[in-house]
Image (cartoon, rainbow, N blue to C red):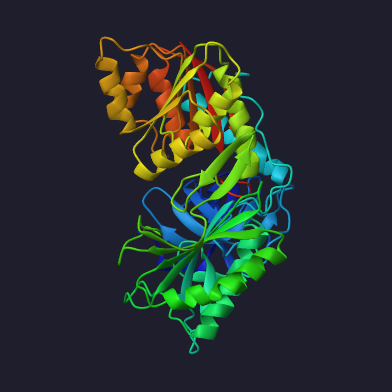
Amino acid sequence: MKDKAENSFLFLIKIRDLNERGQGVGIVQALRDPAETAEGPDRESPYAGKVCFVNGALPGEEVLARLLVEKRHYLVLDLVSILKESPDRIASDCSYFPDCGGCQLRSLTYEAELQWKERRVRYFLTHKGPLEDGSSALCPIIGMESPCHYRGKSAFPIQAAADEGGRPVIGQYRQGTHELVDLHTCQTHSGIALALVNTVRELIAQDQLAPYDETDHTGTLSHLVVRTSFSTGQVMVIFAVQDQEADEAISRWIPALERAVEEGGKSLQSVWINDRERRGNRILSNRYRLVQGSPWIEERINQVSYRISPGSFFQINPLQAEKLFKEVVKAADLKAGDRILDLYSGVGAFSLQLAQAARDLTPAIEVIGVENDHQAVIDANLNADINELSNLTFIEADATSWLEDYGKDPDKKAFDVIVVDPPRKGLDPGAVEAIRRSGATRLIYISCNPSTLARDLALLADDYRLDYAQPVDLFPRTTHVETVVLMSR
């Protein structure tokens, strides 16, 4: 049984890696009394050799940490001091780090971050997928030239401060909590988004509007969402509300919102109110009301225009999306007359890029996109029209069900290329089997989760060989990484 006195001891730990939460992964070496010197002496511990996750620690470091959570197979600890520092450690460029939950890797050099992400993709594709150990099929990761202020969509919860004044607080959740860090600056969100955060905070206080309280379900304003086009400079603002108490105030705020946007060199194109569900974790419901301006903003990437409505899914990082789209087009290696199936097609992001890249081919290629979100299909068809691309068809259906039904059609035409961009959970087993039976010559898999990517590629490996995998960093200073994989039958 554990000695209760051990709770007062610090744990000596050697850090070997990072996990997907950005915590240092290591092994307990010994216990150390915090009253002793940094050199020890150390005490043996029944925890010796146990896996642990240390907040704030980096690979290659030797640290002292305090126990936070004990589980059967691992420990969670908080960094107290660094005995041996990683050469890749840097001072954070953000005063809110690490309290704010928006970033995990601001104390790591960007070069080391990219190397870690590339290693992470290689680990999963080698240990759980079909990539051979040491294979050159994994390409060097594509990083971002300036990994700051890259978010084209930002969502900020709104709360009342716990102090007596109850002043409005707008920002991001503190790590592992629903307590807000009140952001006034940020290295990840756009400058326009933070200018609007600071303006709205003042407007809420001025009009004494009550932020929504998720504990007793009182108040009105829940979230501020800002969408910014990096190519056109158009800005969309969405206020998520629990009732209509703020409607008049939001209408009065528009001149102040316009000034904040114009001072940043952009234009306020669209203002919306979103009527949220009374309870639940979803930030936005499907119920939108246009307060002023256009129903959409327009983003342009690689000669393709996208009209983005308030509920549209679109790549968070438009600058890196340009590189991601080019990698998908390269992998497709389109030939005249090719038939392409784009599963989980969303607003047509990849379908439009492929159609644009092949618009001069004769005979024309054919692109079919399948997406189960009604509004996304509407947006995809609109985007095809504004780009004057007539060789696309978008179908509202579940991707797995549609593909299974298509496979049973005796008169079906085989696809030359299948593009899949599934959610983090990866492909359903039915979709994997349908792809295996599809006869498609090439498969392009875009994934934001190396673990489920590796699992699915292993399931497909009997029918498709892995040609190459290309990681792309769409979310700098976080642990997320995108990967484009080309497989051939």
**Residue 472 visible at all:** no
Nearest the eye: 430 or 125: 430
Q: Position of residue 51 (x, y in %)?
A: 48, 47
Q: Is residue 292 left or right of residue 423?
A: right
Give coordinates of residue 204: x percent, y percent.
52, 79
Q: In the figure, residue 468 lies in which quadrant?
A: top right
Instruction: Report the front residue among 402 and 488.
Output: 402
Q: Quadrant of the N terminus?
A: bottom left
Residue 322: quadrant of the picture: top right
Quadrant containing the C terminus in the rendered view: top left
Please indicate whether residue 185 sits to the left or right of residue 446 in the image: right
Q: Is residue 153 above or below residue 248?
A: above
Q: Quadrant of residue 191?
A: bottom right
Q: Is residue 50 above or below residue 292?
A: above
Q: Position of residue 430 (x, y in %)?
A: 29, 25
**Residue at left 31%, top 33%?**
397
Q: Which residue is rendered at x = 50% and y = 33% of the image?
A: 384
Is 85 left, or right, of 212 in this rendering? right
Measured along the vertical axis of the image, is residue 218 above or below residue 125?
Answer: below
Residue at 69% over, 52% down = 148
Report the label total: 0
Q: Is residue 166 visible?
A: yes
- Is 338 or 463 nearer to us in this picture? 338
Name the one closer to the observer, 380 or 190: 380
Give percent across and percent down for residue 330. Answer: 61, 21
